[in-house]
Image (tube, helix red, strand yellow):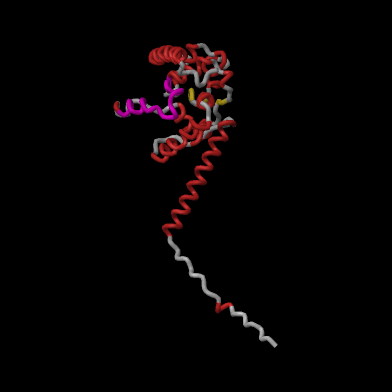
């Protein structure tokens, strides 16, 4: 009679060597995972607003908390006078159609002038107001620099300008071109004249200290220059990316 083969006991099985815990590798692995997650969330967030209109912004919320209410009504770009879109671009970012989010010529000029003038494009302003917060911290600037080219890739130029005109502040508690047109001139944004549009664009850098309906000499001169600039970009093709 054959003898049964003896099964080795569990304690006789070869032991698997334990991996040595390396905190550096563990940290790098989690940094990589969190970075990938952050990039994915950013892409989803930016893509979402390429289709869906922002109902508010962080700055609007803070002003609403301070003032109790704000005047804001979204309006499609097709319902805004073309002169308004051209005036905003002429005033804030004349090379809007030709850059990828950053106007390098304007940045170089600002550096040469020691920061006496701003070089922030319309795209950067949209990123700051829709996705980030107000302030001058390096963290916000770094995030703005990262998100701006992503938005430029996913959004059309027309969409960027549409969002910009709808979230820009035109007076204390007055946000967007629809509210501004009614506030200053008691007309719909589609009825703005070239002069009215230029005056609205002229107050954009400092809306709380300037008025479009009761313009100072400075605002009148700036509006006149903006009106000429708007006509120029219409002629030379620098308005083609958001018109048509």
Most distant residue in the right direction = 1
- Above or below: residue 6 compared with residue 186: below
Can residue 173 be seen at all in this image of the molecule? no
Q: Residue at x 41, y 37 (%)?
A: 141
**Closest to the observer, 202 or 69:** 202
Q: In this picture, is 63 found above or below 16?
A: above
Magenta stretch containing residue 95, yes or no? yes
Residue at image location 50% in from the left, 44% down from the top = 38
The answer, for residue 8, to whether it is visible in the render is yes
Question: For residue 73, which quarter of the picture?
Answer: top right
Q: Residue at x 50, y 25 (%)?
A: 157
Q: Which residues are magenta?
A: 91-111
Residue drawn at the location 55% of the way across and 79% of the way down: 12
Estimate the x, y position of residue 192 in percent, counting from the top left: 53, 13
Looking at the image, residue 112 sits to the left or right of residue 37; the answer is left
The x, y position of residue 67, in whole percent, is 52, 30
């Amino acid at each position: 009679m054959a003898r049964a083969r003896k099964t080795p006991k569990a304690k006789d099985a070869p032991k698997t060597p334990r991996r040595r815990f390396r905190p550096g590798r563990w940290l790098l692995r989690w940094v990589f995972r969190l970075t990938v997650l952050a990039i994915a969330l950013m892409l989803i967030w930016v893509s979402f607003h390429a289709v869906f209109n922002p109902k508010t912004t962080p700055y609007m919320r803070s002003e609403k908390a301070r003032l109790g209410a704000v005047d804001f009504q979204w309006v499609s770009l097709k319902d805004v006078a073309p002169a308004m879109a051209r005036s905003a671009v002429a005033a804030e970012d004349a090379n809007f159609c030709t850059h990828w989010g950053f106007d390098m010529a304007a940045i170089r000029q600002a550096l040469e002038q020691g920061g006496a003038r701003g070089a922030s494009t319309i795209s950067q302003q949209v990123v700051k107001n829709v996705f980030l917060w107000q302030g001058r911290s390096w963290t916000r600037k770094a995030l703005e620099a990262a998100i701006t080219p992503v938005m430029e890739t996913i959004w059309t130029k027309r969409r960027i300008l549409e969002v910009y005109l709808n979230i820009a502040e035109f007076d204390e508690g007055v946000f967007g071109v629809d509210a501004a047109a009614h506030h200053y001139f008691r007309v719909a944004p589609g009825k703005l004249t070239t002069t009215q549009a230029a005056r609205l664009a002229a107050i954009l850098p400092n809306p709380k200290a300037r008025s479009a309906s009761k313009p100072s000499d400075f605002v009148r001169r700036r509006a006149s220059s903006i009106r000429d600039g708007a006509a120029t970009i219409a002629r030379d093709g620098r308005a083609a990316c958001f018109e048509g």
